[in-house]
Amino acid sequence: MASTHCCPSPHRSALACINTVIRKKSAALKKHPHPGQKRAWLLKELGSALRDRFDETEDLLDIDTAIEVHRQSLTAVESNHPLRPSLLSHYGFALHDRFDHSENLRDLEDALSQHRQALELLPAGDPDQYDVLCNVCNALQCRFLATGEGSDLDEAVVLSRKALQLRPTSRDSYQLLGDLLLQRFQASRQQRDLDEAIEVNQQCLDLRPDDPERARIVNALAATLLRISLETEEGLPILEKAISLLQHARDLPLQPSGASLVQVNLAICLKSRYKWLATRQDLEEAEKLCRETLRRSESSAIRQAALENLASILIHQFQTSYQLHKLDEAISLLHAYISSTDVDHHPQASMLRHLASALQFRYSSSTKTNARGLDEAILLLRKAMLLSPPTSPHRYLVASSLALALSQRFHNTRGKDSGRGVSFLEEAIQLQSEVVSAMGHSHPDRREAVAILAHVTEEKYNHSRKLEDLDEAIALRREALSLTRLQHRNPTGLLNNLAHTLQKRYDHHHFPEDLTSAISVCREACIEPSSSTFMTLSLLGKLLCQQYDLTRQPGDLYEAMEAFPAAVADESESVAQRFFVAQKWAHWADGCGHKSALDAYGAAIGFLPSLAMLGQDLSSRQSALTSGTDGLAREAAAVAIREGKFERAVELLEEGRAVFWSQALQLRTSFDDLRLKAPELADQLQTISQKMEQDSYRGADKVTMGSYDVGLAAVSETQSRHLRLLGDQWRACLQEVRGMEGFEGFLLPKAYPDLRHVAAHGPVVILNATDSRFDALIIKAPGTEVLHVPLTGFNADTQQQLAKMRALCEDACPLSCGDRGMRWKDKVKSPETIMKEGLAKLWETVVEPIIRALDLKRSASPPRLWWCPTGSFSSLPIHAAGIYDSPEGESVSDYVVSSFIPTLTTLLRDAPPKVDSFKMLVVIQPNSKGYRPIPNTEIELQNIENIVDDHVLVRYGLPGAPALVSSILSEIPSATILHFACHGIQDSADLLVDEEDRRSPLQSALILEDGPLNVTEIMKLSLKNESLVFLSACQTATGDQSLPDESMHLAATMLFAGFRGVVGTLWSIDDKDGPKVADTFYRHLFSPAGETSGSQATPDTAEAARALHIAVSKLREERCSFLRWVSFVHLGF
């Protein structure tokens, strides 16, 4: 009766061999046409062969024929024949096979009937009784799974106990009973079934201590217990049993592969327990186990499981403590693994999902201005969807992750490319709606799926502004919260989400009950145990401020102003999110007149260097500063001015503006003083700074559907991680330096006692512009207090008038046939009138009050004065303000020689030295592909040749010496003065353009023979002796209007690179003016004692501002258009 095994035949011969057996058995049957044992045996073997062929081909004719053959075998022998139990069992196997294919319950019931008859025919003590009992149990278990009828499972348990009695030393007996008990526990939740199942499995393990299958049994049981724990509301005790089993198994004498599998499963269980208890020790132990497995195991399957779970653990650690290096390691591990294996293999889908999740977490913790990681996550999840069959239990998770990523991408593109963004949203809604619809109400993942659908639906409201979408989002959030409580999970995150959505509905129709409900929900979240209260406190602060607006109850404002700083101080949250909350705190405190406003602004500004931190590439640093940072320092200064703290206002403006440049300049700091005290530390900082600067110029590749390659992404991630690790080392070294006596403020923002030396060579005027007020802060001399001049005459009407002038300048179109700019639009109406009125208004409302406050007098040789404009002042021609419509009129140039500086630190460097010898580099580009010719650049060069001695002059842009980018870059370090006469372009970070199509200020450039010489190429230069650069091109000092306080233009780049002074232009210049201005400028610069004739070998570059002052005055004497002479400006010393 060996043929009565409790599972279908394992025969898997090649199809040809099976066909041969069928032919032989069919031929043999023809020789035995009459009933009898031989015919019955042959029919049974023919039926088994037909079943084998059905397994290979899934041809229903084979299984139907097999069933008929087995039925005939029963008619070939008497009802009491000894062979009949075996014939009945095989008949039952064939019926069961057809049920597995068709799911026709009648086949399963017939199969069960055959196995029962076989059992009844066997006498007590028959050696085959055990196998037949197992067959009956198997059929009963299958019918239970098909119908949910508990009595089938009860009978199966009873019969399996009898099977165990028959073979008390068989491992299979214990496993059968244990599996059935676990299944009954899942159905009825009777604790005694779980306890007995664990006891039975333990007895199985104790049968043979040296059994090599012990590890498999323990792992299988633990995996089942883990799955059960995730599906039940009272899952923690079950999970504890799984952990206990695996911990005990670690002490068993296991094979290396078995031991590794035990370690991985224990790590998985500990990670799951962490989700219940939030005990950090569990996560740390799980991490240790996974790392140990990766070191020791050679099994690819086990290594994949260990790596996948290690990545998941690292992501959890990042979420709870914001250890960015943990997330970086997770992403690097997953990138490396996926890029080194066959990504089309099905198990990879989960790895792709984990990598995508990690990239989503990185995006969510950032300023969300750079969507490269999010785009990569979407591509990975699309690939994972293709690798996840519709029946896969993991497909829900992949689809939900993709829906969430798509909704985030919509949010990122909102207001930029509406058509493209809406496509993201529509796909997210469809995906997640299908996921939730396909899930039963008891599905263990429904809670998370509903929460994601709520998020997507809220994004739908953000697009539609329809209240019904918001109502649906709130209903879904309440459902997710209800499911969370049923599962006894921590509801803090979902409570915060519900409060946020209620607050959004309050913003929609201003019903106070929504605000009250949101606050109530938020307070409920406050009392829940949580590893971080950041989100709850920041949301509560905003809600209470809104309530204060309604009630004017001091208690609401007081509590809000307690909540905001507590959230900002939470170091477990990302710097970006803390920065955004500090902004909210500052906004509400300022608006409500609360005393914490200045502290709030100070906190927000303090985060700026970390947002654009060293350890990121240049484009990422610049991109981070587009996240609402502009205007922060100006608003902070306005509060300080309002409180009479003028020195603090100066400090805040210096710290919170030009962050991009101040961060970059840190890498070029002199470490000479530090080297005297700590030479090794100084050398270490020097090495790190050089590596960081070099690596920061590496651009990040854009992620697109057509070009994405996971291998290239892995390489890019490795490079980025290396740069971030250098940043960590840099910050650690700085912390060590600041612990030394005398270096406490090393590379920290300068305080006013240091900043006041900016006025060593003349007054410095800071112009601060906000929506609420306009002020001038004047540093007259290093030993004087800050002089405050309120610009009360500057108001909304003034701004509107000056906006017309600014628009005119940006669209300027000179009357001549050629210019050096990019814009060629129709002339506006009365440009001279607009300019004249605008410059007069600037004089009356801004400049004249400052001139009077400084008690300056008209002079034929006026003193120097430096303007440091902020905000809207940055794009106004302050240097040209004046009354030009009467003989008695006056202007800035009557009183001072104007220069501009992006920051005070610009002037704190040494003044340009008087050189004994020098080299002047002149680059002209009369013709550039795609641009209008500017032939007067050749005359400009001739004028310079008439002034500067030939042996110190290097020329490019002539026949035989083309102005190639590489040639010019190689010449610049050895030049003292540079002169460019060519086209210039200024790009801006237009936040209304999607990131994939967005230009960057870093792409601003001078146009040469073979292409653009852009900002980043110039930044790479570290210059020591360069004094002056003349940019006789267009828009070289225009700046990015979306980031006016960052001074992202070519002229500022030259200052960063090492030049002490720069001549630039605010807009397009007339081609014929370039030679005139250059001629007068250099004649003064090269003339001793300020004479305008003659030539000398060594110019006084400190006279550059005055030389430009004289050159522009001469141009004005020709009574040319304002648009032609106002554009020229001097920056720096």
Image: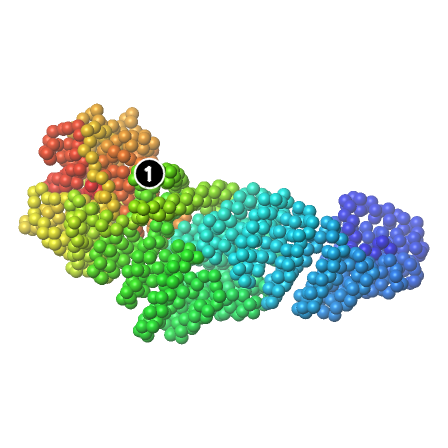
Q: Nearer the viewer, residue 1118 or 1092?
A: 1092
Q: How has the structure been colored for display?
A: rainbow
Q: Which residue is mark 1?
A: 675
Q: Which residue sits at x=10%, y=47%?
A: 895
- Dot 1 alpha-carbon crowd within 10 angstroms: few under 14, some 14 to 19, many 20 or more: few
Percent position (x, y) of residue 712?
A: 49, 41
Percent position (x, y) of residue 424?
A: 46, 56
Locate the N terminus and report the quarter of the image it occupies: bottom right
Quarter where residue 69 is shown: bottom right
Percent position (x, y) of residue 199?
A: 71, 62
Q: Secondary structure at mark 1?
A: helix
Q: Which residue sits at x=91%, y=59%?
A: 82
Locate the C terminus and report the quarter of the image it occupies: top left
Q: Which residue sits at x=14%, y=44%?
A: 864
Residue 684 higher or lower than 3, as above or below: above
Percent position (x, y) of residue 357?
A: 51, 53
Quarter where residue 1036 is shown: top left
Residue 741 higher or lower than 129, as above or below: above
Q: Which residue sits at x=35%, y=59%?
A: 582
Q: Nearer the viewer, residue 658 or 732?
A: 732
Residue 953 higher or lower than 288, as above or below: above
The amino acid beneath tag 1 is: Arg
Residue 68 visible in image: no
Q: What number of labels is visible?
A: 1
Tell whether 822 sits left or right of 687: left
